[in-house]
Amino acid sequence: GKSTLMKGIVGVLKPMAGTVVRAPGVRAAYLPQQSELDRSFPARVVDLVSLGLWPRRGLLGRYTREDRDSVSQALMAVGLGGFEKRPIDTLSGGQLQRTLFARVLLQDADLILLDEPFN
């Protein structure tokens, strides 16, 4: 129920009937209950969190010093300061979930939907 509703709000699922309408210009971010992330992908925590800047920078945008500071602040906010260079395959499940939460924070969305983020 709740997960399906959230997926409908952010557009991951299309409703079988009716419509979902968001106010124009409202940016939404979504953190699913279970990540479908391939943990064997050779990425570091900083790489994964920096993807939260993608809505602002685009695929080929350059990261500024301010962006790097924002990544560090997001990691500090979720209790992962100093984890920037850790490979994601070395993180516990809880650490990975907090890493993904830091990525959501960087999106600077108007609406953040969290599907049981700290279970």
Image (tube, rainbow, N blue to C red):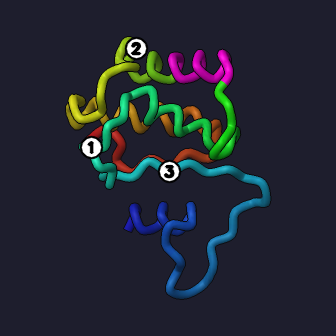
Kind of residue indicated by mark 2: Gly
At 68% from the left and 37% from the top, the residue drawn is 61
Kind of residue indicated by mark 1: Arg
Say few, some or many: other residues with alpha carbon within 10 Å of mark 3 (under 14 / 14 to 19 / 20 or more): many
Q: Nearer the viewer, mark 3 or mark 1?
A: 1
Q: Main secondary structure of the magenta part?
A: helix
At 23% from the left and 35% from the top, the residue drawn is 89
Mark 2 sits on what residue? 81
Horizontal and vertical percent for residue 101? Answer: 43, 36
Horizontal and vertical percent for residue 69? Answer: 59, 16
Say few, some or many: other residues with alpha carbon within 10 Å of mark 1 (under 14 / 14 to 19 / 20 or more): some
Horizontal and vertical percent for residue 13? Answer: 49, 72
Q: Is residue 55 visible?
A: no
What is the magenta range?
Answer: 64-73
Q: Is residue 76 above or below residue 19?
A: above
Quadrant position of residue 97: top left
Is residue 69 one of those drawn in magenta? Answer: yes
Mark 1 sits on what residue? 39
At 29% from the left and 49% from the top, the residue drawn is 38
Q: Nearer the viewer, residue 5 or 85?
A: 85
Whole-angstrom CA distance, mark 3 to mark 1, is: 19 Å
Mark 3 sits on what residue? 30
Q: Quadrant of the C terminus?
A: top left
